[in-house]
Amino acid sequence: MKFINSEFSRFVIVGGLNTMNYYVIYLICLHILNLHYFVSHAIGFVISLVGSFFLNSYFTYKVKPTFAKFLKFPLTQVANTIMSAALIFVFVDFLHVNSSLAPILTVFFTIPITFIMTGRILKPS
């Protein structure tokens, strides 16, 4: 039970849920709405960002979500956004990875950076 009660494990759980949310939205945009993979990524990312803010506030860090934190929260995603977009581009256009699989691969590279930045924004100093 100690593992489940740690911030990092809660962050991983929230990240897993948020990633599934993002991926479903991404696939809907990509395959049903026939949007470009990069547009699909952007739409999925923005929608999942809002859910991530509330889940990380209430569950991961157990802090009260405020409007000020909500405005700062996207800053935690700057590195994630740049890194994931670049990695998706590299995976799809240079390494010829299937565009449906590329976002899943990026998660393994972005989790540690996102965890550190999210904690710095949401937790009191």
Image (cartoon, rainbow, N blue to C red):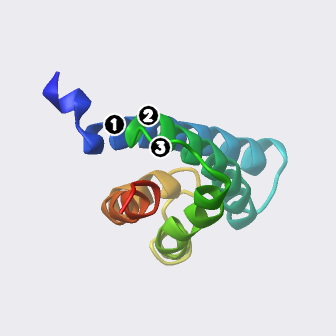
**Residue 108 placement: quadrant:** bottom left
The amino acid beneath tag 1 is Arg
Q: Are marks 2 and 1 in contact (CB under 8 Å)?
A: yes
Q: Name the residue under label 3.
A: 56
Where, quadrant-wise, is the N terminus in this rendering?
Answer: top left
**Image point 70% across, 49% down: which residue?**
47
**Image point 69% across, 43% down: which residue?**
25
The amino acid beneath tag 2 is Phe
Disc 1/disc 3 C-alpha distance (Å): 8 Å
Residue 59's mark? 2
Residue 10's mark? 1
**Image point 47% across, 74% down: which residue?**
79
Q: Where is residue 85 in the image (x, y as percent from the top left)?
A: 56, 71
> Against 77, is 10 above or below?
above
Where, quadrant-wise, is the C terminus in this rendering?
Answer: bottom left
- In the picture, measured across the screen, residue 8 lies left or right of residue 96, that is left
Q: Do the residues labelled 3 and 2 touch (CB within 8 Å)?
A: yes
Going from N to C along the chain, the mark reached first, 1 or 3, is 1
| Label 2: how many Cα within 10 Å (few below 14, some 14–19, many 20+) | some
The amino acid beneath tag 3 is Asn
State whether residue 88 appears in this view: no
**Residue 21 placement: quadrant:** top right
Camera-nearest residue between 96 and 118:
118
Disc 2/disc 1 C-alpha distance (Å): 7 Å
Q: Where is residue 95 in the image (x, y as percent from the top left)?
A: 45, 72
| Label 3: how many Cα within 10 Å (few below 14, some 14–19, many 20+) | many
